[in-house]
Image (cartoon, rainbow, N blue to C red):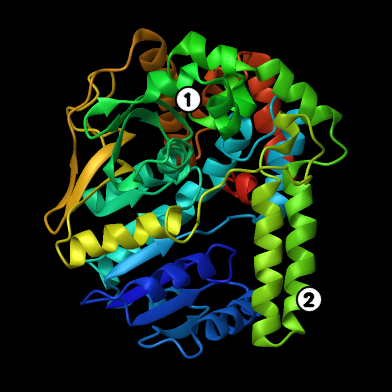
Amino acid sequence: MKLAILGGGGFRVPYVYEALLRDRGSPRIDEVWLHDTDPARLKVMTAVLAALGDGAAGAPEVFTATGLDRALDGADFVFSAIRVGGTAGRVCDERVALGLDVLGQETTGPGGIAYGLRTVPVMTRIARRVRELAPDAYVINFTNPAGMITEAMQAVLGDRVLGVCDTPSGLGTRVAAALGLDPSRLRLDYVGLNHLGWTRRVLHDGADVLPAVLADDGLLGSLEEGVVFGREWLRDLGTIPNEYLYYFYFNREAVRATLDAPQTRGEFLAAQQAAFYERAAAASGGAAVELWRETVAARSASYMAEMKGSATGAEQAGHSGVDPVDEGYAGVAVRVMAAIARDEPATMILNVRNGATVAALPPDAVVEMPVRVDAAGVHPLPLDQPDLHQAGLMQQVKAVERLTIRAALTGSRPDAAKAFALHPLVDSVSVGRRLLDGYIARIPEVAAVFAPG
């Protein structure tokens, strides 16, 4: 089977390839096409994958393409992990917002809107090419803002597009490890949008172990969410929110911490990645792999450092991540492919079409929730409805996502201004308009959306 990876020169690619190397089922991916607009990054990642696959039995053959159609033609699956505007765009996403004392973050708040405005048109065009060149392919979307982009692509390809994020499943893995339980026997009662959801129960063989987690100071404090939110707030809620909800529940603290930091997360990653690609280009394959491992380890360990009281980029002691190959997004993606291609049914949390699952949202809205995946496709599982607080926040953010998609596809400045103004982390019409003007002035790809003709 053929897998096309869009954004094939990016940091996530080796994780995906390692997950493919561990997959021994049949049929399996035997042909990987890396597509990227940057030939130098493609060359580095090709060397890394060659070193990872050296000596491995049945290692998928790797091809590269700077032309999209060649990579897509006849693909069985398409992974999308592109960044329109590059890391420079991410830095502007952050800095324009911070210049107006509003949260600067790449997927949440105004930065996510700016990212969506320039990404939706590109991903919609890609969806049309998939429809022409690989009509039977499933698209597994990693491109952020993942829920918004998945919804925009579904307008072209329907349910053959699904979004992957490892944050919800990562919590289940970490809870299982803390309690000494088998993670395969855990099921999360989870509902929300991408980067905006709540784990309401953690079921082990049908019994909810979340109350025991919330009651245990040591265990709760050892979880990423306990560090970010604090034990008291998690106990007040009675749930464990997706960690990105920190930006909503502690917005003033998050903005202050980001403003006080000497650099933003985007600035840290831009410098880190530039150094990696420069060094890796001059290294042998094995040395390039070690450079990559060192870089991604530092990247992961410094995740949300500012929200934990540390400097941007500072590695956190006792960082409790998950294995990104097995339990992270790469492992989730490979399980999705195995479920569809080999009819190996799996239950996981994905971004998929709502249908009738969440009554507070339209049927065609993309929601992050538990699903069963098999050869017949993706099937949302029944769940309890979100409470008023959860449903209200989901509705408001979904309204912003839809305004953003519409503005991106039509060039409507009024829709874009409404998207910024109505986001709960902006809550000001005048600031919303200034945000739109600022992003148009600073990011060429956003300006192009609103250019005449």
Q: Amino acid at mark 2?
A: Arg
**Residue closest to the far left:** 376
Please name the residue shown 29% across and 30% down the image: 203
Pointer 1 residue? 241
Q: Which mark is residue 222?
A: none
Q: Position of residue 25 (x, y in %)?
A: 24, 74
Judge from the rendering whether residue 202 lies leftward or rightward of residue 14; answer left or right: left
Q: Amino acid at mark 1?
A: Pro
**Image quarter in which the N terminus is found:** bottom left
Please name the residue shown 73% across and 53% down the image: 269
Q: Position of residue 5 (x, y in %)?
A: 44, 69
Pointer 2 residue? 279
Q: Residues within 10 Å of mark 2 (few under 14, many from 20)?
A: some
Q: Check the image and report above or below for 78 versus 46.
A: above
Q: Residues within 10 Å of mark 1 (few under 14, many from 20)?
A: many
Callouts 2 and 1 close, C-beta under 8 Å = no
Secondary structure, mark 2, is helix
Give the Cα separation between the discs numbered 2 and 1. Answer: 38 Å
Q: First in sequence: mark 2 or mark 1?
A: 1
Front-most of residues 86 and 382: 382
Q: Position of residue 273 (x, y in %)?
A: 73, 62
Secondary structure, mark 1, is strand
Q: Check the image and report above or below for 92 versus 110.
A: below
- Where is residue 189, by image quadrant? top left
Please name the residue shown 52% across and 17% down the image: 234
Q: Position of residue 102 (x, y in %)?
A: 71, 23
Q: Nearer the viewer, mark 2 or mark 1?
A: 1
Q: Check the image and report above or below for 434 versus 121.
A: above
- Where is residue 139, by image quadrant? bottom left
Front-most of residues 221 and 101: 221
